[in-house]
Amino acid sequence: MFMFSKTAHFGIALGIILIASFILQYTLNMHTDPQNVYSLAMFPIMAIFIILAIVKVSRNGEPFSIREGLKTGIGVILLGSLMLWIYIIIHASYIETDFVDKLAVVAEQDLRKNSDFTDEKIKESITFLKDNFKFAIFIENVFKSLLSGFFFSLLTSLAIKSKIFTNPNNA
């Protein structure tokens, strides 16, 4: 129960920060920009939340395992990215109803840069994006976050398990 409560606290906090970042991007009209700096800035913030949650769980007095660290880190990133995914769906449905069309324009521009795509293939891809918007955003946000969250969690758990930061002989 202890691990879940800490995962939930950090995951909800991360989700709120991710949503706030998306809203900031929206107000600056940068949320559909493929060269978005805010997306890169969120990467270290996600890492910090994962690290803080794993460190908190490792200090609960029980023996720490890499498995616990992975569950904690992945739980934090899953909760935060699911919150963002749900907000983006709400945003696209009620706040900015042409959001999917804007994403389609950006996707089409990116596909046209690649000479391997014919006009027919580009139209197919754009139609697929529009028809499967929720799934595409899920893959973009949640799956990629889980992948990076797994590696952050693994590295943090290995560092804590090896006591690399607490052993004075490592200096």
Image (spheres, rainbow, N blue to C red):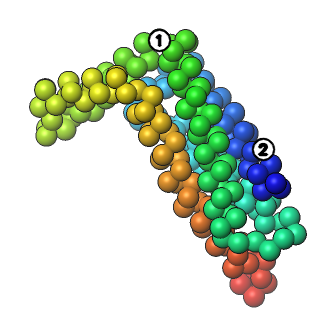
Instruction: Indicate left or right for 43 with 55 as reference.
Output: left
Which label was assigned to residue 84? Answer: none
Give the residue type at disc 2.
His
Task: Give the image quarter of residue 102.
Answer: top left
Report whether residue 167 is seen.
Answer: yes
Nearest to N terminus: mark 1 or mark 2: 2
Looking at the image, is 14 positioned above or below residue 73? above
Q: Residue 68, how many percent across, how many down? A: 70, 64
What crowding class fits label 2: few (fewer than 14 Cα within 10 Å), some (14-19), or many (20 or more)? some
Q: Residue 139, how many percent across, how many down? A: 44, 40
User: What residue did someone put label 1 on?
Assistant: 97
Looking at the image, is 105 positioned above or below residue 169? above
Name the residue at 34% across, 23% down. Answer: 131
Name the residue at 65% across, 67% down. Answer: 67
User: What residue did someone put label 2 on?
Assistant: 9
Instruction: Indicate left or right for 34 with 27 as reference.
Output: left
Q: Residue 79, how many percent across, how many down? A: 65, 42
Give the residue type at disc 1.
Thr
Looking at the image, is 152 positioned above or below residue 166? above
Q: Residue 11, how many percent across, how many down? A: 70, 44
The C terminus - image quarter: bottom right
Q: Which of 59 and 39 is in front in this view?
A: 59
Instruction: Indicate left or right for 36 with 71 as reference.
Output: left
- Secondary structure under badge 2? helix
The N terminus - image quarter: bottom right
- Secondary structure under badge 1? loop
Looking at the image, is 169 positioned above or below residue 48? below
Report whether residue 106 is seen.
Answer: no
* Distance between mark 1 and mark 2 Cα atoms: 31 Å
Q: Which residue lies furthest to the right in this view?
A: 61
What crowding class fits label 1: few (fewer than 14 Cα within 10 Å), some (14-19), or many (20 or more)? few
